[in-house]
Each structure stands twice: as structure tokens, then as C-alpha cells.
Amino acid sequence: MYRNNNGFTMIELLLTIHVTILTTILLSMLIPYMKPPSSYQSFQIYQFFGSLEKEIQTSQHVYINDDTLSIHTLNGDIITISQYQHVIRRQVNGRGHDILLRDVQTFTITEEEQIHITIETKEEALFYDTVTLFQSG
């Protein structure tokens, strides 16, 4: 009996195409559920902490009221940082809507001897920072 070993038969080709299509369909349904951990968001939050600490250290006065941080700058501007829905925004003199962070579940600011900032993301990751106030004078 003669057998052709030079290529694929039609059944092998159809079977390969069928398996490829099924795999593609299954993967396309699973991709939305496979979410890698976001190191980008943690980088954004640590960058936010650094810029916030710099603004606090170079300010004239800092006030905290209901998880809203008001920073009075040396040139007389009042910078307000607060949570608005699921973002943390920055306003200068009550104007603007600069988004500093997205996908924030809770934003908590407390002041004892230091300023304690806690951010919980929608993915329930918890970030914490402490800023020491320097007294001028």
C-alpha cells in the first residue's frame, strides 16, 4: 500500500484549524479574568506620596478637615487635595480638577504629631505614608 508522507492530509488540516479556533475562543473568554498585579498603580501611589510630601514640606501652613488636605503655599495659593468619587484630585484656590490618582476606594488623612496618609485601592491594596511637619521659626 502506498502512503504519501510529503504533507498533511485534509483531515489533519481540518483538525488543526478546529483546535486552533477552539483555543482562540477559550483564551478570548479567559483573558478578561486574568489580570496581572499592577505595579504601575503602586508606582503612581509612591510617586504621589513623594510629591505630596514635597508640597507639604515647602508650605506655609497645612490644615486637615474631613480627609481633605489644605496646603497654604508661600505665594498665597491654597492647594486642596481630596477624594472625589474614585479619584484623588488637586485644586488650586478652589479651581481645577487635576487627577493625581485613579481607582481609589478610600483616602484617609489624620494628623497627630505627623500627617498619616492611607490609600486603599479598588483592588483592596493598602498604602500608607507618614509626613513629618517641620516647624519654622
Image: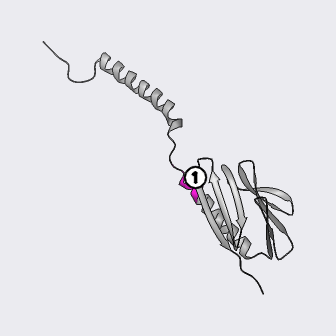
Question: Residue at (12%, 12%) from the top-left corner?
Answer: 1
Question: Residue at (50%, 30%) from the top-left corner?
Answer: 29
- Which region shows up in magenta? 37-42
Assign a secondary structure to mark 1: loop
Image x and y of residue 31, in percent: 50, 36
Look at the image and tell me in which quarter the C terminus lies.
bottom right
From this viewpoint, which residue is outermost toward the top?
1
Query: Where is 98 relative to 3, above or below?
Result: below
Query: Where is 19 relative to 48, above or below?
Result: above
Disc 1 marks a residue whose amino acid type is Ala
Is disc 1 surrounded by few (<14), some (14 to 19) or many (20+) residues within 10 Å?
few
Q: Is residue 52 visible?
A: yes
Residue at the spot of label 1: 125
Image x and y of residue 62, in percent: 78, 71
The answer to which of 34 and 2 lies nearer the viewer is 34
Question: Residue at (87%, 73%) from the top-left corner?
Answer: 76
Q: Is residue 74 left or right of residue 23?
A: right
